Image: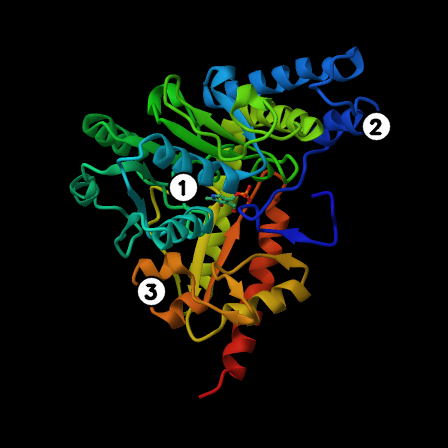
């Protein structure tokens, strides 16, 4: 860990930018800061670096470079995929998604509902699983797109996206998957999965914030969400964020090279942490199924305490984790993901997500395991009634 002041267990929120990635992007902030659309060499030559990064990123997901559109973030990619499906199929006004998607998807779909579109949010089981028969039955003649995340950011639960893609293909409906949490943690191969579109965000894989991509299958019609200049072959207006694109390319290359080794190591650390908590702190339970799950994520319910209090005391010990809850205007709403899984509001409010990454060490896990029992005991002792 580079920052000795913190023990970082919130890698699903964002990740440390890898030193190699910082190195790769710096020349594009310091020296090569031109505009790639310029006619002179100083700007124009940057297009080659963008192409190079696109090729490296395409390799991470086994796509063709030309099928990748750079966006500003995963949120934009999700919004763009759904927007395009509706705009290119004006007769179809229904979106099928799940109740546990990231807000980048849920909030956009709620906005669509206000605009008169129909949206179905599929329920999940207490383990966090989808009923694929229900999914298939919920596809309507006017369904424009099915959008289902690959890996849940709060629980790490994986959805069977390959089966879902096959169902959509057989029904002739577009399929989008939000693979923001999957990339860098699982092998992502668009040749095998065959989605129509797929979202990624660079800051979840050790690149900076503010850069993402939308993979778009060849011959799928596309209506840009952001229009302006002719960048990205007219599919996404806005001057390219060259330094971030180069950074994304280097991060993708590193992620691909270390995927297997990193996930095996991270999984062992996650299991050590999870088992340590569940075995040593009474009144704890994992939220959601043990498998299939991301190798780095553990979401734990602590009976009789509020996540807010746990996070505060963890913070005082230099440990960064998060609750699945969205903090809105000062009030802590229970997580929509845990609520959809049938957790009571009290259980959801007492749940913490630990998400590990490649820079975590065994010593850090043991540090958490040393401090957490005392934190929970203290909060329980002080809890009203
Ligand atoms: N989708 C998922 C599953 C996420 O976890 C996130 C970020 O937390 C996003 C989308 C949004 O990505 P970004 O922060 O790049 O907008």
Q: Are marks 3 and 2 in contact (CB under 8 Å)?
A: no
Q: Which quadrant would the C terminus be assigned to in this image?
A: bottom left
**Mark 2 — residue?**
30
**Which comes before the other along the chain, label 3 or label 1?**
1
Disc on res. 101: none
Disc on res. 151: 1
Applied colour scheme:
rainbow
Give 169 or 338, whichever is nearer the viewer: 169
The response on whether ligand 1 sits within 8 Å of label 1 is yes
**Whole-percent x, y for residue 161 in the image:** 32, 34
Residue 286 appears in view: no
Cα–Cα span, label 3 and label 1? 19 Å
**Mark 3 — residue?**
343
**Whole-percent x, y for residue 8 in the image:** 63, 50
Q: Disc 3 or disc 2, which is closer to the eye?
A: 2
**Whole-percent x, y for residue 273 in the image:** 50, 52
Helix, strand or loop status at disc 1: loop
**Whole-percent x, y for residue 55 in the image:** 56, 16
Give 292 or 140, whichever is nearer the viewer: 140
Q: Residues within 10 Å of mark 3 (few under 14, many from 20)?
A: some
Which image quadrant for residue 310? bottom right
**Which comes before the other along the chain, label 1 or label 2?**
2
Q: Is residue 63 above or below residue 139?
A: above
Please report the residue visible at 58 percent of the width from the left and 65 percent of the height from the top. Answer: 311
Please report the residue visible at 43 percent of the width from the left and 52 percent of the height from the top. Answer: 107
Give 65 or 79, whichever is nearer the viewer: 79
Number of residue marks: 3
Cα–Cα span, label 1 and label 2? 37 Å
Q: Is residue 286 above or below residue 51?
A: below
Helix, strand or loop status at disc 3: loop
Helix, strand or loop status at disc 2: helix
């Amino acid at each position: 860990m580079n920052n000795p002041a913190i023990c970082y267990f919130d890698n699903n929120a964002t990740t440390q930018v890898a030193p190699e990635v910082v190195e790769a992007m710096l020349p594009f902030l310091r020296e090569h800061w031109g505009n790639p659309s310029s006619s002179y060499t100083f700007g124009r030559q940057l297009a080659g670096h963008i192409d190079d990064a696109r090729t490296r990123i395409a390799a991470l997901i086994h796509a063709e470079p030309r099928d990748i559109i750079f966006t500003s973030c995963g949120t934009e990619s999700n919004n763009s995929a759904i927007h395009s499906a509706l705009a290119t199929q004006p007769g179809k006004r229904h979106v099928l998604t799940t109740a546990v998607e990231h807000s980048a998807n849920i909030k956009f779909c709620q906005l669509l509902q206000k605009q008169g579109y129909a949206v179905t949010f599929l329920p999940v089981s207490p383990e966090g699983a989808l009923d694929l028969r229900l999914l298939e039955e919920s596809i309507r003649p006017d369904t424009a797109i099915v959008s289902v995340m690959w890996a849940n950011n709060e629980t790490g639960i994986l959805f069977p996206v390959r089966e879902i893609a096959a169902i959509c293909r057989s029904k002739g409906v577009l399929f989008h998957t939000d693979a923001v949490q999957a990339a860098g943690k699982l092998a992502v191969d668009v040749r095998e999965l065959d989605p129509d579109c797929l979202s990624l965000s660079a800051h979840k894989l050790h690149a900076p914030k503010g850069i993402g991509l939308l993979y778009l299958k060849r011959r799928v019609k596309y209506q840009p969400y952001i229009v302006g200049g002719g960048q990205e072959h007219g599919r996404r207006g806005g001057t390219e964020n060259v330094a971030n694109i180069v950074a994304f390319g280097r991060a993708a290359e590193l992620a691909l090279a270390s995927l297997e080794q990193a996930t095996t190591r991270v999984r062992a650390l996650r299991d050590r942490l999870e088992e340590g908590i569940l075995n040593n702190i009474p009144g704890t339970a994992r939220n959601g199924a043990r498998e299939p799950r991301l190798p780095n994520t553990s979401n734990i319910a602590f009976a009789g305490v509020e996540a807010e209090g746990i996070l505060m005391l963890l913070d005082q010990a230099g440990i960064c984790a998060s609750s699945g809850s969205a903090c809105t205007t000062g009030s802590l709403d229970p997580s929509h993901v845990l609520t959809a899984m049938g957790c009571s509001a009290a259980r959801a409010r007492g749940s913490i997500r630990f998400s590990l990454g490649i820079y975590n060490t065994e010593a850090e896990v043991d540090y958490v395991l040393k401090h957490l029992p005392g934190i929970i005991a203290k909060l329980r002792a002080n809890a009203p009634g």
